[in-house]
Structure formats: C-alpha cells, structure tokens
Amino acid sequence: MTLILGAVAYDPKVVTIWNGFRAWLRAHDLPFDYVLYSHYERQVEDLLAGRLHVAWNSPLAWVRAERLARAAGREVRPLVMRDTDRDLRSVLLVRADSPCAKVAELQYRTVGLGAVDSPQATLLPTALLREAGLVPGGDVTVRRFDTGVGLHGDHIGGERDAARALIAGEVDAAAVVDTNVLLFGREGTLPAGSTRVLARTGAFDHCNLSAVDTAPADLVDRLGELLLSMSYADPEVRPLFDLEGLREWREGRTSGYARLAAAVDDEGFYDGRGRVTARGYSP
Amino acid sequence: MIVPGVLDLHGLGFERGAHLLVQQALKNTPPGGELGVTGADPALVVHLTAWCRRQGHRVREASDTDSGVRALVVRGRADLDRWAGAVRAGGPGVDGIVAEPPSDWGLAARGALVESGGPATPFDITHRDLVWAEIAPALYASAAASQWNPDTEVHWDAGEPLPDEVEDAVVQVMTYLVENEQTALVVPARLLARVHPHFREVQQLLAVQAADEARHMEVFTRRALLRRDELGTSSVSGRESLAGLVAEADFSVASFLLSVLGEGSFLNLLDFLDKNAPDPVTRQVTRLARRDEARHVAFGVAHLQHQAERDPEVRRRLRSAVERRYRALVDTAGLNQDVFDALVILAAGAWEPDAIGKGYDAVMALQSEMDEGRQRRLVHLGFPADEAADLSALHTRNFM
C-alpha cells in the first residue's frame, strides 16, 4: 500500500518540494506518493473522503478538516508541522504619520485586508477589529485584496497589494503577517520608517500535516518518524528544508488554532459541521 | 549603559541591516542560550520575531522585569548545522592543491569553505597528475603579461606590393595558418571545459592559450586580406588531419599531438616564415605568433614530462596515439599541395627559375628541421632516439 499525501499547488515550487520529499521518503523505504490540488477545499473534502491519507493543510483547512471529521464521528490529527509554522502573529500597520493610536480609532476608516480566505491577512485581523468593538463592513470599511482565492492566503500577492495601498494612501491600515512585514520592508514595498504597527494579533500556528483516521496507521506513524528524523545538518535534506522554509519538523499540535476557529465562527466562514458558508467565496 | 548579554540596536531596523548585528552577537551564544535585544525601532519585536523564526531561533518576549530588554532570542543551531560538514576546498595557493578534488566542490574557489552536498559537476578531468605541470602558474603569468595588440604591434602599411604570384602564395599560406589556428583554439577550449576548476592555473593557461590562437586567427586573416579580397584553398586531407586532433578525448594525448608534435612543428614553420617571407607584415605576424606558440609547446612538454615521471606507461599511450593517427591518415593526401607550393614560392620571393629552386631547397630544409625538432622533444620526454625518429616520421604530413 502506498501512503498518499495531498498538497495544494500554490506555487510551481510545490512540485520540486514534493518530488524531493517523495524521493527521500521512498529511499527510506516508505511507499509514498502525492497528488496536487488547485485549492484547499477540495483537498480537505478528499482527505475526509479517504482519497488521501495525509494532507498538507493550511490552518483554515485544518479547522475545516476537524469540523468535517467531528460531524462524521471521525478524527483527524496534526502529525507534524514546520518549526516556522509556530507562533506567528499578524499586525495591523498604519502609516507612520497616522493619527490612530489604537485599533478602535480605525472607526469610519478603511482597512486593507488580504484574500477572503486568508487566515493571517483577513480572518484573524478581522477578529482583532471586532475585539476592539468595531464592525468590519459596518463602521470600518474593508477593502479586500483577493489574490489566489482558495489558497487560504498562501499567495502573498494580496498582502503585498494591501501594503502598497497603505503606502499610496488608499487605505488607512493594512493587515500583514509578521514574516511579510519583514519581507516587504526589505524589498522596499514598505520603505523604512513609513509605517508603524498599530496592533498585533495573538500568536497562532500556521500549516500542519494532517492525517485522517482511515489512513493506514503504521504508514502514517512511519511518515511522522521519518520526517522528525530529518536533520538540517544532512546535506541531502538541507536543500529540501531551504525550499520548504523550515529548519526542523516539530510534532503537530492543535493549541495554535483556537483563535482562528473563533474567527471562522464570527465571520461565518464555515459552519460547525465544516460546510462552506462564507458569502462570495468560490475557490 | 552596556548590559552583558544584551544587544542594543539603537535606532537600526531590520529593513536596514539590524540582522547583521544580531547574527554577530549570536555567534558568541551557545545553542539554547539567550541573547537580550533592545533598540529604538518601534517594529523591532515584529521584525526580530519573523527573522528569528526563519533562521531557526526562537524569540521570548521580555517582561517588565527584563530591564529595558525588548525581546530575548533563544539561539537555534540551524546556522551551525548548515556548516557542520563544510570543508575547505584545499588552499588558495599552489601548495593547497588537492590531488583528486570531489566533484561537488564544483565551481567553488580553491580554498573556499564549501557547504556539504551540492550538485555533482560535469568535469571529468579530476586528477592533478592528468593536467598538472610545475611551470603552469609561471607560464600563465608570462602569457598574461605577453598579450599583444595586433593594431599597434604590426605595421600593417609597411612594405611594397609583391609580384602577383608571390602575393597569392602568401595568401595561401595564411589561409592554411588560420585553419590550423582554429584547431589550436578549439582543442584547448574543449579540454579547458573538462578540467576540474580546482586546477585553476591550468584552466587559466588554457584560456590564455585559446585567446592567443584567437589573435593569431585575426592577424593571419588580416594579412591574407591585406591586398586581396579572397582567401586561398582548404583541402579535405588538411581538414581530416585536424579533425583527428579535435576528436582526441584524452587530455595528455591531445596535449601531446597538438602542443608537442603539432605546435612544435609550427615553431619551425613560423620561424621559417619569419626568415623567408617576402614582406615585413608577414614576418611580423609570424614572429609574434611564434612567441606565443613557444609557450604552448613549453606547457605541453612540461606536463607530459610530469606525467611520464609518475607513470612510464604514458609513453606507450602516446606512441599508440601517433600510430593510430598515422593509420587514420595514411590514405589521405597529407599537406594541401597548394600550401606546399605556396611555401616554395613565398620563400622564393620571385617568379623566376633560380628563385623557385632556392625556395624549394628552403622548404626541404624546413621539413627536416621540423623532424629534428620533433625528435628532440620526444627524446626529452624519455623516448629512445630510434623510437623518437620513427614516431616523428609517422607524424602527419599536414605538419599540425
């Protein structure tokens, strides 16, 4: 039997990455193959339908997988995650000369967000606005930069467009994950000193490798063991890690998803049984 | 106040190089140890957190009791792991050459610290003794210093027009030389692309050698076209002889056939042209080219000597290469008859019976000088005199 992994092809490098992992895993005696999806919703549905054994899930895909599983009396578990998937934060940026000193002062102003299904640039920042007593789309105008809908924010184009709109004065604030704040600063999209951080979300976790309970447990466990055994000091592994953006695999954990699950409920993105209820969302 | 274990970035942000200071400070922190970071940039904690996550470090946010520290970096070990298996690719000097450098050192500078792993490279000439000669660095230095400018070193307007028949002969000889120099460019260029870059002095020398030949092609073409619109002839047999040189895959055998036997014979030919050419431009271009060729021959001889000292078996391979080439060319016409005739007329310098007779004698003398030169070099490489004479006689009649 071959263990089948699903991954979303958000970028051409995904093929290189999983070809590399595939070769490495097979060389370590794990019968392994992968299939690629054009968006996360079909991947999650296929995972629960048993067409996949494990899936490289975005945090939002994880939330949905868990709900679909629970509704069906089933289980999914986060097998492993990258070290770089832990404890991210999104920020609301304003221009350095903005009169706003706290989130509540964004009332009657415009906030630039990422794609409708981006955890880090839409769902979690929206929750931050709500916590401050604002109603997104009500007393705060939301301008969405919908790039790569269905990719759950993996495509950073939406965040970059929001950052550009902030610099151009088209929006009063922009939501960007901390990693991209650094990236946009270095590439010049956000010139040094041009913006400041108005607020940060709490820490949250990003992707995980989700395993479904119908998958062959011995192969899933073996996959987990093999991945956790990979070392950045190994010259064969290092290029794969560099490409996939990690330094070590860590055990999967669920503690970093509560904030997103709450945001999903507040926004009505999925219902409690994992059905897509977001309006205007068609991946 | 400077607090030990705390790095103060002052106003420097991560958009302007703050990571360099953090990186440097972490060098003195063991994995698992903590470095406090402070600074005035409002985005410091956001940037530091994102940067550390990417580098495999963790960040612990400071509490009020951490006396001005804004965040604590828990040092990871990814940077150490990246270089854990790294090795020095020998040393930068000649004494740092490794006899058999690994393929995955690839294009790394000799002496660089090479990260482990990396792609295998296509260089198939990977042993020092297959390419090396002690004089390679000195020859390269001399070659680089001896490059000359055809525009200024040759007085292109010197001399009077020659009789038509003599001018035609010069054009024919130049046409032949260009053909041969093209070969002499391609052979080292092909070898150069196969030599492991670790032996950089050899690569550099071969590169300059190819550049020398490029210049020779230029000056011989210019001389041919000085008073004519067309070049002379190119025979099948001449090109057959040269094709055999280009096809030779073994570095030492190629070097032997091209540099020791071919270019060695060319030294005599260029010397002959310098002494016998009827006009100053031909004499100048052949004299300048000869200087370069002497270096090429010197490298070939030195390299083969180096090899023969280590492996007497090499001489057997060289001998069979000459015999093989002889057999391949035995049914061909050898030197283009037009070239032979042109050499006679060129040396005659005039279109009269007496002059032609003298020219003919000069070409005969040239051929025996070539033969003696080849024998001398073969003896130098350790061949017994009688064997050297036999091998020289088997050398292609096309000279190169």
Image (cartoon, rainbow, N blue to C red):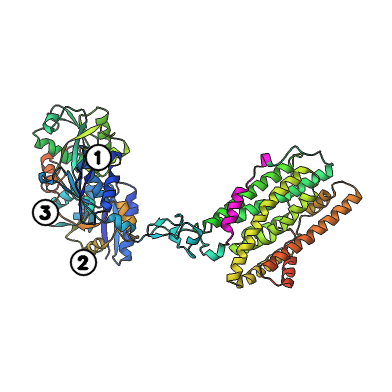
Amino acid bearing label 1: Val
Q: Magenta part of the protein: which range? A: B133-152
Instruction: List the residue tagged with mark 2.
Output: A218
**Element under label 3?**
helix
Chain of the residue that carries numbered disc 3 in the rendered image: A
Which marked residue is nearer to the observer: mark 3 or mark 1?
1
Amino acid bearing label 2: Asp
Chain of the residue that carries numbered disc 2 in the rendered image: A
Q: Count of labels shown?
A: 3
Residue A50 visible here? no
Say which of A165 and A115 sits in front.
A165
Q: Quadrant of the N terminus of chain A?
A: bottom left
Please indicate whether residue B190 sits to the left or right of residue B264 in the image. Answer: left
Task: Please report the residue visible at 82 percent of the width from the left and 41 percent of the height from the top.
Answer: B162
Tag 2: Cα neighbours inside 10 Å, few (<14), some, or many (≥20)? few
Instruction: List the residue tagged with mark 3.
Output: A70
Do marks 2 and 1 both belong to one polypeptide chain? yes
Mark closer to the chain start, 3 or 1: 3
